[in-house]
Each structure stands twice: as structure tokens, then as C-alpha cells.
Amino acid sequence: MSNGAYPFKLLHEISAIPQRRWLIKGVFAAGETSAWIGPPGSLKSALLAQAAWCVGTGEEWHGRKNSGQADVLYFALERSDLVNRRLSAERDRAGLSSTDRLPIGVVTSMVDLMNPATVDRVVSTINRAGEEFGIPVGLVIFDTFAKLIAAGGGDEDKARDQGRVFANLQRIKNATGVHIALMGHTGKDESRGARGSNAILGDVDLL
């Protein structure tokens, strides 16, 4: 193959495509992306906090089978105190103490995923969390998608800017195999779905 060419396989060299590896059956699959869109106050963050708890503890999630405990990283890019309270409430509900170690981590730093250089830092954080808890990270939550764009001066109304973020999200998944769950808001007209460009529709596996 010529120097500088992208590697490829011929069709006869490609083995059977592996089945999806589920974290929560029918919802969170390894290496995929989901988007959770709703107006403010629709409890989507509470729903994802529950999902983080269930993936991290191995519990079922709203009747959906858990395929095995995995580490979770929750990037709380807005209202991080509320995220911490919700996760603490799940711990209290389970009758656990604040000293019990659970494979759930919360990141409160701002993340600029318009910038490709940020990919290495996110991947390093994912790997570090896996080392800390002794099991690989399976689920990464970004709350919210808009903040990933705004942190780099981008505009969620622009398909170009959304595309830059999704290219970097794909690089993260390629390097780690995690499922990425994105939190987003609806616009003023809730019937039109996610706020900003509709490019997100073509870049997620579950909406």
C-alpha cells in the first residue's frame, strides 16, 4: 500500500460483524451514541443519573436488563451540584454509605470538544477512571451537548460546529469503545425536537 494511504480491508477479508455489546439491553450499546432531548424540567438529567447508577452497580434500569457492571463517567458541564445530589440520593436509596466505593465518577471541568486536542484528555480521563476502579468505563455522559460546542466558541445552530464535535466524539469512541450519552434541550417549539441544527439526527444511534 502506498505511503500515506488509509488502511482498508477487502470484503473477503472482513469477518462476521460482531453483535452489539449491551450495557443496558436495548438502550446503551458499547461504541454507540445516544441523545436524550427534552425541555428544561423534563427530568432527563434525573433519568440519566439513574442510568449512571444502574450501569455502575449492575442493576436493571426501568425493567431493562443490565449486561454487567461497568464504570461510568458523568461530565456534569452544568448544574454539577444537582448531579451530585441525585447520585447521592441513589446511594442513600440503596442503603449505602458515603464511604462505599462505587465505579461512578463525576467531572465538573468545562470540556471543549470543538478542539481535537481535547480528545486525548478525555480519553486519558476515561482510562484513568478505569484504572481507579479496576473495571473499564462503559458509559460516558455529557450534560449538556450544547456546552461541548459553546466551550469552544461554537454555535449549536451550525451543522458545521456540531459536525466538529461529533467527529471528536467518534475519536473518543474509537479509542475507548464506550457508549456516549448526550443530554440536550428542545427549542422553543418542542415539536421540532432538539434545539439548534438537526445534524444531530444523523450522528446518533438512539434519539
Image: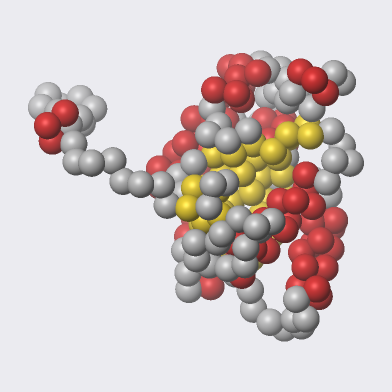
Q: Is residue 198 above or below residue 101?
A: above
Q: Which is nearer the eye, 98 or 194? A: 194
Query: Which quarter of the figure has residue 107?
Result: bottom right
Quarter of the image with the N terminus in it:
top left
Q: Which is nearer the eye, 26 or 178? A: 26
Image position, residue 193 (x, y; %): 74, 23
Q: Is residue 136 above or below residue 181?
A: below
| Residue 107 falls left or right of residue 163 | right
| Residue 1 falls left or right of residue 164 | left
Query: Which quarter of the figure has residue 31?
Result: top left
Q: Is residue 62 above or below residue 91?
A: above
Residue in the image at 69% along x and 56% along y? 62
Residue in the image at 62% along x and 63% along y? 60
Image position, residue 4 (x, y; %): 20, 26
Quarter of the image with the C terminus in it:
top right
Q: Is residue 202 above or below residue 20?
A: above
Image position, residue 10 (x, y; %): 14, 28
Residue in the image at 83% along x and 46% along y? 43
Q: Which is nearer the eye, 194 or 152? A: 194
Residue in the image at 47% along x and 36% along y? 170
Is any atom of residue 113 visible in this view?
A: no
